[in-house]
Image (cartoon, rainbow, N blue to C red):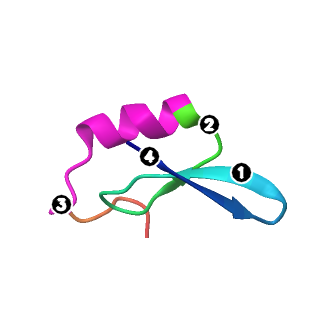
Amino acid sequence: MVATTQRDGATWYECEKCGLLFDDESDAEAHEARCDPDEPSYIQ
């Protein structure tokens, strides 16, 4: 389940495994379903 956070007056959805932020909840959920926090992030 993704976490919801407020930043800069907008709602963001955070992957609870790696912390990556998304502006769309369905994108965040799709990412989290395949996220492997042990792999290095491709976005640094």
Residue 11, numbered circle: 1
For label 1, the crowd category at 10 Å Cα-Cα, with few meaning under 14, some 14 to 19 and many 20 or more, is some
24 is higher (above) or lower (below) than 2:
above
Q: CA distance from mark 1 to mark 3?
A: 27 Å
Callout 2 secondary element: loop
Residue 24, numbered circle: 2
> Quarter-wise, where is residue 9 in the image?
bottom right
Q: Work out whether residue 44 or residue 26 is closer to the camera in this orientation and state it.
A: 26
Residue numbers of the magenta segment: 26-39
Earlier in the chain: of badge 2 and badge 3, it is: 2
15 is higher (above) or lower (below) than 25:
below
Earlier in the chain: of badge 1 and badge 2, it is: 1
Q: CA distance from mark 1 to mark 2?
A: 9 Å
Q: CA distance from mark 2 to mark 3?
A: 23 Å
Q: Which residue is mark 4?
A: 2
For label 3, the crowd category at 10 Å Cα-Cα, with few meaning under 14, some 14 to 19 and many 20 or more, is few
For label 4, the crowd category at 10 Å Cα-Cα, with few meaning under 14, some 14 to 19 and many 20 or more, is many
What amino acid type is highlighted by mark number 2? Answer: Asp
Callout 4 secondary element: loop
Q: Is residue 36 magenta?
A: yes
Q: Is residue 25 left or right of residue 42?
A: right
Residue 39, numbered circle: 3
Earlier in the chain: of badge 4 and badge 3, it is: 4
